[in-house]
Amino acid sequence: MSSILLNVKNIHTYYGSTHVLHGVSLQVKEGESVALMGRNSAGKTTTIRSIISLTPPKEGKIYFKGKDITCLPSHLCARMGISLCPQGRRIFPGLSVIQNLRVPVFSGNRDKNLQRVFKFFPELFEKNKQLAGTLSGGEQQMLAIARALIPNPKLLLLDEPTEGLSPLIVKRIHETLNEIRKMGTTILVASCNLIDIALAEKVYIIEKGKIVFQGTAEELNRSHDIQRKYLGVAL
Amino acid sequence: MSLGIELILTQLLNALCMGLIFALIAVGLSIIMGLLGIVNMAHGVFYLFGAYFTVAAVSWYPNFGLGVIIAALLCSGIALAVFFLFIRYLMGRRRPLEIMVALIGINIICEELIRNIFGAEPKYLAIPSMLSGQVTFNFLGVTLMYPKYYLSLIIICGSLLILIYYFFHKTDLGIRGLALIQDREIALALGVNIAKLGTLFFAIGGAVAGISGALAGPIFSVYPTMGIELLGFIFVIVIIGGVGSIEGTFLASLLISTIKSVGVLFASNVVVDAFIYVLLCVMLCIRPRGLKGYLGVLE
C-alpha cells in the first residue's frame, strides 16, 4: 500500500467575498493518477489553485508528503515538487520555446531533463528557437506540459490539458501523459472532458464547490447516470 | 537656416547618443513597472543622484571614470534602501496609489536634500580631458566634426544596453524576470521568487539610471530638478515601448530622441515636446500596450 502524497482536507476558498469551494477533500496516493471532473465553474481550477496557494484557502488544510503546505507561497510549493500545467496553457508568449523551458526553478540536472522532455515532444526541439506565442494550439499545450515536466515533479497538476484540441492531438497528449504515469509521476488532472477519465485510476466529481462522487474510473465509466447527472453528457 | 547634410547627420548622431542615455534610464523603470506593477515616481532620483555623486566624487578625486563607478554603486545602494524601507512595506498593503504618493514624496525629499547640500544653482561637470575635443569624419565626401565625448557616450551606453539585453535573454535570472512580467502567477507556480528578482532588478535599475545621470552630467547641466524634469519623457518612452519590454524601450527611446533632435531643426523646442505628448496620447488610444508590450501587464 502506497502512502498518501497529496491530502486536501476540507478546504474553503473564496474569490473576494464569493465562496467557491465548500469543504473540498481529496487524496492522491504516490504513483497514482487521479481525475477531478466537473462542469465549467464547478470549482476544479479553484481546487488546483488552492493547492499551490495561487488562491489560498481560508479554511482547511493541505498536506504534501505529510507536510502542511496550506498557504505556502506558490514558488515554494513548486520547489517541494508540485508542478502546474495551467488551464489555457499560459505559455510565456514573448519567450522562445527553449526560454520557456528555462523558467522553472529546481535543483537538478537541467540538460538531462531537457533531453527527456524533448524525447516526449520532438516537435518542440525542432522549434526551440521559435517564439512560443507563434506556436499552434497543440504545440502550445505540449510546451505547457513540457514546461511542467522540466523540474521532474513528484506531483503534476494538469488543468484542462485537452481543452480545445483536435482529436489527433488529444490522442497524442494522452499517449505522452500515460508514458509519464508509467515512469512514476503522480498526476492530478482537472477536466470537464470525459475523455480525460482515460488518464486516471480514481475519479472525483466536483459540483458547485463540493465533491459529489468519488470512485474508480471503471465505476464512472459504467454508470451513465452519474455521468449524465454531474457531467451533463454520457460516453 | 539652410539644412546642410552635415547638420542633419550631426543631429542624427545626437539623437542616437540621447536615445541611448534615455534607454538606460527607461529600461530600469519599465522592468520594475512590469515586474512589480508599481509606478516608480522616484526613478528620476537615481538619475539625479548619479550626476551629483559624480560631481562630489570628482571634486574629491579628479577621475571621471572612478566617479561614475562610485555613483553607480551608491545609486544601487539607494535603490535597495528605497525598496526595503518603503516599497516592500507598502506593497504588502496592496494599495497602488499609496505607493505612488509615497514615491513622489521620496522624490521631493531627495530633491530638497540635494538643494540643501549642493545649492540650487547648476553644477558644472567637466568632460574628462581624455575625451574632450572633436573627431573628424570623412563620410561619402561629407566632412563632419563631432565631439569625442558624445561618441564615447554612444559606445559606452550602447555596450551597457547590449549587456542588459544579453542578461535578459540569455541568463536564467533575466529570462525568469521576463517570465514574471508576462505571466506572474505561472512564473510563481514554476518556482520563481519574485521578491528576490524584484530586489535584484531594483538595484540594477538604480545603478544603470545613476550611470546615465553621471554620463549625461557633462552634456546637460546638473541641477536639482533634472530628475523629475526628465522623468516625464522617460514615462512616455516606457508607455510607447510597452511596459516590461526591453526591445520596446530601446525602440521608443531612439524614436523619442530622434523626434527631439531632428524636430528642433524645423520647430521650436516647446512644439517638439508637445508633439511627443500628442504621440503618447495617440499611442494610448490605438495601442495601449505599446509597441512591444504584453497584454494585461499593468492590471
Image (tube, rainbow, N blue to C red):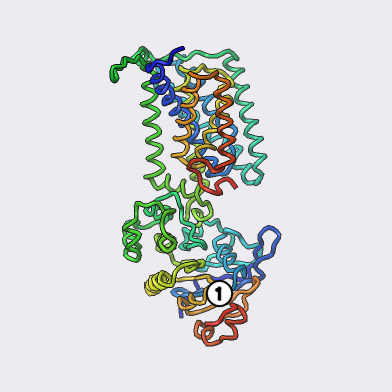
Q: Tell me if A145 is positioned left or right of B223 in this view.
A: left
- Residue drawn 51% across and 66% down? A159
Residue under numbered circle 1: A37
From the viewer's perspective, tell me whether residue A228 is left or right of residue A139: right
- Vertical placement of B84 versus A210: above or below? above
- Which of the 4 quarters of the picture holds residue A122? bottom left
Q: Position of residue B4 (x, y in %)?
A: 39, 15
Give the residue at x 61% y 22%. B113
Q: Secondary structure at mark 1?
A: strand
Rendered location of residue A10, percent (x, y): 63, 71
Q: Is A115 displayed left or right of A57 in the figure? A: left
Chain that bears disc 1: A
Tell me which corner region of the image, top left, top right, bottom left or bottom right, holds residue B107: top right
Q: Residues within 10 Å of mark 1 (few under 14, many from 20)?
A: many
**Percent coordinates x, y for residue B166 in the rendering:** 37, 40
Q: Residue at x 53, y 78 (%)?
A: A203
Which residue is the extreme one toward the front?
A: B2
Q: Is residue B70 above or below residue B191?
A: above
Q: Position of residue A232 (x, y in %)?
A: 60, 78
Q: Nearer the viewer, residue A208 or A71?
A: A208
Residue B56 can be seen, yes or no: no
Residue type, label 1: Met
Is residue B104 shown to the viewer in this render?
yes
